[in-house]
Image (cartoon, rainbow, N blue to C red):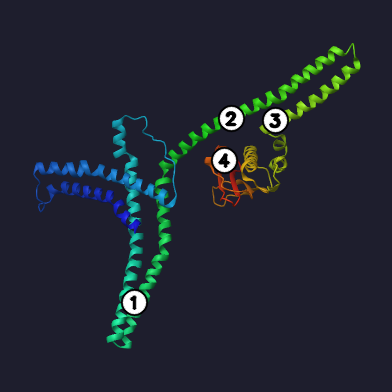
Amino acid sequence: MTSLALALFYLVPGFILVVSATWIGLTIATPWQEALPIRVWHELVVDVVVFVVLMPPAATLTARLGCAVQRRRLGTVFGIVESGAPDPLADDTPLLRTWRFVFGRDAWSMVAYTTIAGLHGLLAGGLVVVLVVCGAASAAAALLGLAFVLLLGSAADLVGPLLLVLVGALAALVGLRLTPYLVATEVLLHRVLLFDAPEVRVRRRLMHLQNSRLRMVDAAEAERTRIERDLHDGAQQRLLALTMTLTRARARVASDPAQALELITEAQRESKEVMDELRQVARGLHPRVLTDHGLASALPVAAGRAPVPVRVDIDLEERPSPRAEAVAYYAACEALNNVTKHARAHEVTIAAERVRGAARGRRDLLRLTVTDDGVGGADPESGTGLYGLWDRLDAVDGTLSVHSPAGGGTVLTADIPWEA
């Protein structure tokens, strides 16, 4: 019923334009039609103001209101929301912004959107109303008729009312069963028109790239700071201690050779510790095993460093591109970090496989799936971990999906182009 009522409102912009176009056509045809009366000039001026000056902007503004109602309904009723796209008219003058707001391409597109949505709502809502209301009313009326037939008629007269009761009840039942599917088609239509239109996709992509770029800059700066801190607090301090040990050994070579030998042995041990620490830092940048042996060897190494038991299941007949391997490896490491920090899981599974493009023109994908049995409830808004994964995948046109019901664990799926 809501869809049917809103459909009448959605059709108003199209109706206004039809009325305006009809008046324009009749006015142009008046001089060549003797049956049509000639309008006086002051009446013609009033009609021009109404049908040409006022009605078109009224149609576009009403269409914008209708699209706003559609977005609002998608968000409040169905939970489908989308962050606003950047305003392409932000740098225009107020006059030009107003002109484009009323007569721009977006405004006329919204007229088309509301008209299509109105026709769908009218047909779908009308179908359900006819089936449910008329079917239920017919069945109720037939039941009343049965009472009169039983009192005044014969047994043969019961066939018609009984048949009408059955048909009416069946029609009402069919209408009720169709309602969820018709509502689903309405939601899909609104999403396609409002969120997946070509110009909306372009603006959403630009907005996403802008936000992603800012987060990548922040992540790079945080990583640079971490490496600088690790080198300063770790390797640099050990190198300073190594230098002092060698200086002491050099000073004692002539006077106390045995003590100098002990200091040299200590310096050798410190140098090995410095090398191990530098390897740990370098491993965080790009592990050698990933470059030399690929994802099938690097993922078990990353899993072995996790404090949670991790099972690795890799089904790759050949290696993807180096960029795809690097993105998958760091996505797995970040996912394991998130599991360690937030999930309180007892077991984690990492799976990697190749998904071949089923349709023509579809690219093969490297699919990485990280599953844990933790507390679930992973939310990108609660931290930067999932945002970092999203940005890293988006940089190579990959996609990230997270299924994390509260108390039901988390399944993170990353699809990366095989030839990224």
Q: Which image quadrant: the C terminus?
A: top right
Is residue 276 toward the left or the right of residue 199 in the image?
A: right
Tag 2 secondary structure: helix
**What amino acid is labelled 4 in the image?**
Leu
User: What residue is shown with label 1?
Assistant: 164
CA–CA distance between discs 3 and 1? Answer: 81 Å
**What amino acid is labelled 3 in the image?**
Ala
**What amino acid is labelled 2 in the image?**
Ala
Q: Which image quadrant: the N terminus?
A: bottom left
Mark 1 and mark 2 in contact? Answer it, CB < 8 Å: no
185, 47: nearer the viewer: 185
CA–CA distance between discs 4 and 1? Answer: 59 Å
Dot 3 or dot 1: first in sequence order is 1
Task: Where is residue 315? Give x, y as percent.
Answer: 68, 49
Mark 4 and mark 1 in contact? Answer it, CB < 8 Å: no
Residue at 21 percent of width and 40 percent of height: 53
Dot 2 or dot 4: first in sequence order is 2
**What amino acid is labelled 1 in the image?**
Leu
Residue at 85 percent of width and 23 percent of height: 265
Dot 3 or dot 2: first in sequence order is 2
CA–CA distance between discs 1 and 2? Answer: 73 Å
Tag 3 secondary structure: helix
Is residue 414 toward the left or the right of residue 290 in the image?
A: left
Q: Is residue 180 above or below residue 150?
A: above
| Farthest residue, direction bottom | 154
User: What residue is shown with label 3?
Assistant: 282
Task: Where is residue 72? Give x, y as percent.
Answer: 38, 47
User: What residue is shown with label 4?
Assistant: 386
Q: Is residue 148 visible?
A: yes
Q: Which corner quadrant of the image does residue 380 belong to? A: top right
